[in-house]
Image (cartoon, rainbow, N blue to C red):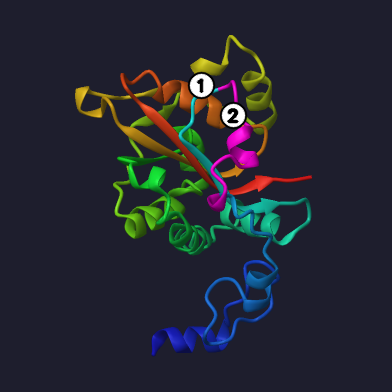
């Protein structure tokens, strides 16, 4: 009842187009869901996201749910998730993508889901990691433990300085590290993030995870930048 009263004065709007949601819609309106650019990566093991990491890191699986275009619906969703506190977007995308990934034999062998971490200072500033709800939704649907503590970010940086650091071979392995014990050996880790762009952040995270003896890496993201 209280929720109905709140909705009466502050009706929920679509996170993609900001139109009012009707009673059977959740976070994203039906029209936006219909217009979202799906990659269908899960249907092709050697998709473009997987190929992006050829010769860079050994990956078992790589995929993204959506294509990210400048000024498109997906950019609006990711912006609202990342900077406007609309964490429920991550939940919706995680539940959606989990249904596609359930049939992947490779994903079925994953032992833990690992988010790309924020630096502690950035986490305090933003108040949340934008991939947490995405990871928790995947975890619940796929019945795979979510572990936000294994991978850590050592360096706080603004976006541009992070890009510069990631482009320097002497800095890439200093950004992330792992806190692991023997129980983490020989595990298959599913690394998750919001958007695959250059792949440098995911590559740096993978280098850190591969310090664990016997580690295997797969990557799943909400979206992938597409020209």
Q: Is residue 186 left or right of residue 105?
A: left
Which portion, as a residue range, is magenta?
Answer: 42-56
Instruction: Work out whether 31 lies above or below 179.
Output: below
Residue 214 quadrant: top left
The answer to whether residue 116 is visible is no
Q: Which mark is residue 53?
A: 2
Instruction: Work out whether 206 lies above or below 17.
Output: above
Residue 72 quadrant: bottom right
The answer to whether residue 80 is visible is yes
Quadrant occupied by the N terminus: bottom left
Residue 35 quadrant: bottom right
Viewer-side residue, 57 vs 5? 57
Q: Is residue 53 magenta?
A: yes
SS for dot 1: loop
**Main SS category, magenta section:** loop
Identify the residue at image location x=26%, y=28%: 184
Instruction: Work out whether 55 lies above or below 64.
Output: above
Q: Residues within 10 Å of mark 2 (few under 14, many from 20)?
A: some
Quadrant occupied by the C terminus: top right
Q: Is residue 117 magenta?
A: no
- Locate residue 98, reporting x and y percent: 44, 58
Which residue is situated farthest in the top direction here? 170
Instruction: Work out whether 180 lies above or below 101.
Output: above
SS for dot 2: loop
- Locate residue 16, reporting x and y percent: 67, 67
Among the two numbered marks 2 and 1 on one chain, the one whose residue lies closer to the N terminus: 2
Q: Which numbered disc, 2 or 1, marks the residue closer to the eye?
A: 2
- Locate residue 38, reporting x and y percent: 64, 58
Identify the residue at image location x=65%, y=40%: 48
Q: Residues within 10 Å of mark 1 (few under 14, many from 20)?
A: many
Q: Which mark is residue 175?
A: 1
């Amino acid at each position: 009842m209280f929720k109905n009263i709140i909705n009466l004065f502050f009706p929920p709007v679509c996170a993609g187009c900001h139109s009012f949601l009707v009673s059977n819609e959740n976070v994203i309106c039906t029209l936006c869901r219909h217009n979202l650019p799906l990659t269908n990566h899960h249907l092709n093991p050697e998709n473009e996201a997987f190929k992006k990491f050829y010769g860079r890191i050994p990956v078992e699986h790589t995929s993204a749910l959506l294509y990210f275009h400048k000024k498109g619906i997906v950019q609006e969703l990711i912006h609202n998730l990342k900077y406007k506190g609309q964490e429920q977007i991550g939940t919706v995308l995680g539940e959606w993508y989990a249904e596609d990934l359930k049939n992947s034999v490779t994903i079925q062998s994953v032992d833990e889901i690992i988010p790309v971490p924020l630096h502690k200072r950035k986490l305090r500033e933003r108040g949340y990691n934008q991939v947490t709800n995405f990871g928790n939704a995947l975890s619940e649907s796929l019945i795979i433990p979510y572990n936000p503590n294994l991978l850590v970010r050592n360096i706080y940086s603004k976006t541009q300085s992070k890009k510069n650091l990631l482009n320097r071979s002497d800095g890439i392995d200093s950004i992330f590290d792992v806190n692991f014990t023997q129980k983490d050996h020989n595990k298959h880790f599913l690394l998750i993030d919001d958007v695959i762009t250059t792949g440098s952040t995911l590559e740096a995270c993978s280098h850190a995870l591969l310090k664990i003896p016997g580690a295997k890496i797969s990557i799943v993201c909400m979206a992938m930048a597409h020209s």
